[in-house]
Image (cartoon, rainbow, N blue to C red):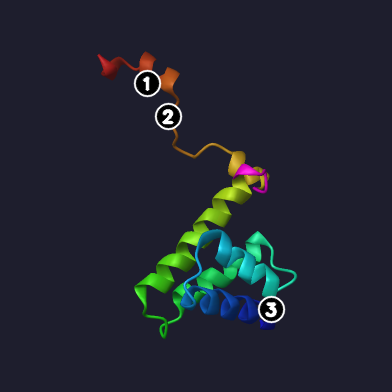
Amino acid sequence: MGEKRKLYEALVDGAMDGLTDKALHDYVTQRCDNASGKKIVQAAILALQDPHLKDRNILDTICTLAIKHRADDKEKGGSSKRDAWPAPFARHPEDEAQSPNSA
């Protein structure tokens, strides 16, 4: 838990100093050598769950960084095979075109 706590503190400190986006990411990775995208997202979730953090701007900055990191990981192929599966009840466009109710 110590590693997540260090990342959490770096995220909050950077956000409190007014850092956002790339600057905040650089600040966190500079303070924590082994900060991966996954670990940063986990630390951001810890920060979002902290009842003592009430400043909306700080929470917004941390949330934005976590979402951006998660999206970047997916674009780089960091997602698992499970993410490539179709949704259980997904409709395909060709199925809707052949449906008798779509008249």
Asked if disc 2 and disc 3 are in contact, CB closer than 8 Å, the reply is no
Residue 38: image x %, image y %?
64, 62
Q: How many marks?
A: 3
Q: Nearer the viewer, mark 2 or mark 3?
A: 3
Mark 1 sits on what residue? 96
79 lies left or right of 100: right
**What is the quadrant of the N terminus in the image?**
bottom right
Inter-mark Cα distance, 2 to 1: 7 Å
Residue type of the residue flagged with mark 1: Glu
Residue type of the residue flagged with mark 2: Arg
Residue type of the residue flagged with mark 3: Glu
Residue 49: image x %, image y %?
45, 76
In the displayed structure, 70 sits above or below 90; it is: below
Residue 68: image x %, image y %?
52, 54
In the displayed structure, 99 sits above or below 61; it is: above
Residue 62: image x %, image y %?
48, 67
Can residue 41 be seen from the camera position used here?
Answer: no
Image quarter for residue 34? bottom right
Q: Nearer the viewer, mark 1 or mark 3?
A: 3
Mark 3 sits on what residue? 3
**Residue 19: which disc?**
none
The span picked out in magenta is: 75-79
Q: Secondary structure at mark 2?
A: loop
The question of residue 35 being in magenta is answered with no
Q: Secondary structure at mark 3?
A: helix
**Residue 91: which disc?**
2
